[in-house]
Amino acid sequence: MLKDITLGQYFPIDSVVHKMDARYKIIITLLFLVMLFWGQHFTSLIAGLLFVILATVCSKIPPKMIIRSIRPIVPILIITGLLNLFWLDGGKLLWQWHFLKISEQGIQTSVFMFVRICLLIAGTSLLTYTTSPIVLTDAIESLLSPLKKLNMPVHELAMMMTIALRFIPTLIEETDKIMAAQKARGADLESGSLMQRAHALVPILIPLFVSAFRRAEELALAMECRCYHGGEGRTRLRQLKSSLRDYVALALMIFMLSAVIIINLIIGG
């Protein structure tokens, strides 16, 4: 299961999406999230699905990678779907047993939330799949640059966000190694009650925290040895430049968002 978590990974492929300005990719991703959560009708999900398919094709990311990014949260989606299915009222009552009941509104909400969260994970994963951590840091810093007038440490904030995102795959790999080492020593991590499984995770969490703090200290020392002093006077090897494909992608996203808003207003009215 841990190997299926691909959050924070970057896949260097020669594609149109990889060549886009990272600032526009972040803005388009935010507009995509607004589009998903704006309305309560399936039109937003259809538009979101079209966006994910189009972005996946243009980025040349294998569809199995998108599926791998969704797979770890399937248990949470199933639990959420069951709660919505058995506890929500509305519409025609289809089945009832004591306090449990299934209605048309419950089925619709369960399916809606399931698809929405899947599209949310798939769409946001494409951002990290197609953008390197360094470029992502520069893009976040550029978008937050107006906050510098309020004396906010924009560069440091962007750097912390990117480092945290970058170290997710590293910590996952470290966790997998620790679990394999504990199993080789006879630790039982998969059987027993819920409390027994939680207690069995203690020998994993402690060395994981120790390893995380050690990596953080090593990274801080490496940055200090290289005379890193934040964003003041810092130069960049690659400058962020927008092009026609960025404008076209942003215009397409705005068009889809506007269409979803108008359709939702018409249906809601």
Image (spheres, grey):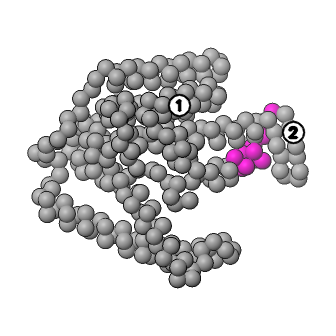
Q: Give x and y (percent) for residue 189.
A: 59, 74
Q: Residue 89 magenta-drawn?
A: yes
Residue closest to the eye, 186 or 246: 186
Question: In which quadrant is the C terminus drawn?
Answer: top right
User: Mark 1 and mark 2: span between their CA atoms?
Assistant: 34 Å
**Is 149 placed above or below 216 here?**
above
Up/down of 27 relative to 174, above or below = above
Numbered disc in front, either 1 or 2: 1
Relative placement, left or right, of 16 versus 148 is right
Magenta includes 7? no
Mark 2: which secondary structure? strand
Name the residue beneath numbered marker 1. Answer: 53
Quadrant of the rendered structure where residue 88 is?
top right
- Residue marked by disc 2: 94
The image shows residue 164 at horizontal and vertical percentages of 36, 55
- Magenta residue span: 81-91
Q: Residues within 10 Å of mark 1 (few under 14, many from 20)?
A: some
Query: Is the C-beta separation of discs 1 and 2 under 8 Å?
Result: no
Q: Nearer the viewer, residue 63 or 198?
A: 63
Element at badge 1? helix
Mark positioned earlier in the residue sequence (1 or 2):
1
Residue positioned 41% across, 50% down in the render: 8
Q: Tell me, yes or no, if residue 71 can be seen here.
A: yes
Which image quadrant for residue 148? Answer: top left
Which residue shows up at 62% across the image and 51% down it? 74
Helix, strand or loop: magenta stretch: helix
Amino acid identity at mark 2? Leu
The reply to whether residue 35 is in sight is no
Q: Residue at x 27, y 46 (%)?
A: 134
Q: Position of residue 141 (x, y in %)?
A: 26, 41
Kind of residue at disc 1: Ile
Q: How many C-alpha atoms fall within 10 Å of the one at disc 2: few (<14), some, or many (≥20)?
A: few
